[in-house]
Image (cartoon, rainbow, N blue to C red):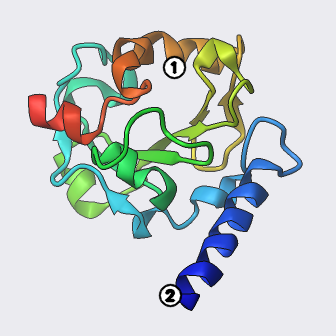
Amino acid sequence: MKIRYLVTPCVALLVAGCMTTSDPQGPQANAWEQYKDWFKVTPEPNTGDPTGFLGNVHEGLNAYRDVYVNELGRDVNQGEASFPYPAGSILVKETYRNLAAYNAKQNPDLTIMVKLLEGSSPETSDWEYVMGGDGLNRGTGTSGVAVFCHSCHTAAAETDYNFMNKSFLNDH
């Protein structure tokens, strides 16, 4: 029992640290540096366009995608806690151009969603969207990145704007 009480404050400090970085939009890029150690949402790579919204986005119909969620967002993603995701939740999607690239694990494109503190970006339902693992192309509010990403993600409003979760995967 004592260990549980010691770990909980550490986790809270870690999350608070991520949400109060020098970047007011959200955590630094190193917050998702170890995403391969997180819970893998997609039991096998997602291909095609199960959402009906991809078009040419995220490499379109030919791509292979894997999605990961950090520990903070795992229970919501897996239906063990209710939506919305808690602030500090991070989802990372790897996108590979085709099966050969996926099998070789060659240079995936990363797109990231970060749940911000409530009220941080009402236009995006408090999500920050990040294009690229370096964290340089990111957006909230009415920025170009935010509008581009959130315009599709509104179709997943019931699941806090995230397509790849247990509910969605069970239905498709």
Residue identified by numbered label 2: 1
Type of amino acid under label 2: Met
The CA distance from mark 1 to mark 2 is: 43 Å
Task: Determine which of the numbered discs, if any, sits on residue 149 in the image.
Answer: 1
Question: Foreground mark, 1 or 2?
Answer: 2
> Does residue 27 lie above or below 55 as drawn?
below
Type of amino acid under label 1: Cys
Tell me if I can see residue 98 in this picture: yes
Query: 31 or 80, which is in the foreground?
Result: 80
Image location (x, y in percent) of residue 52: 22, 14
Report helix, strand or loop for mark 2.
loop
Query: 7 or 58, which is in the foreground?
Result: 7
Image location (x, y in percent) of residue 108: 41, 50
Image location (x, y in percent) of residue 125: 58, 20
Which residue lies at the image location 34% right of the left edge and 44% below the top edge?
77
> Does residue 163 lie above or below 96 as drawn?
above
> Does residue 130 lie above or below 139 as drawn?
below
Q: Residue furthest bottom?
A: 2
Which residue lies at the image location 42% right of the left edge and 70% below the top edge?
37
Which residue lies at the image location 67% right of the left edge and 16% below the top edge?
122
Crowd around label 1: few <14 · some 14–19 · many ≥20 (10 Å): many
Report helix, strand or loop for mark 1.
helix
> In the image, is 13 to the left or to the right of 110?
right
Which residue lies at the image location 69% right of the left edge and 72% below the top edge?
9
Q: Residue furthest front?
A: 1
Q: Are marks 1 and 2 in contact (CB under 8 Å)?
A: no
> In the image, is 53 to the left or to the right of 121?
left
Image location (x, y in percent) of residue 164: 30, 36
> In the image, is 90 to the left or to the right of 69?
right
Tell me if I can see residue 172 in this picture: no
Query: 163 or 5, which is in the foreground?
Result: 5
Query: 61 or 124, which is in the foreground?
Result: 124
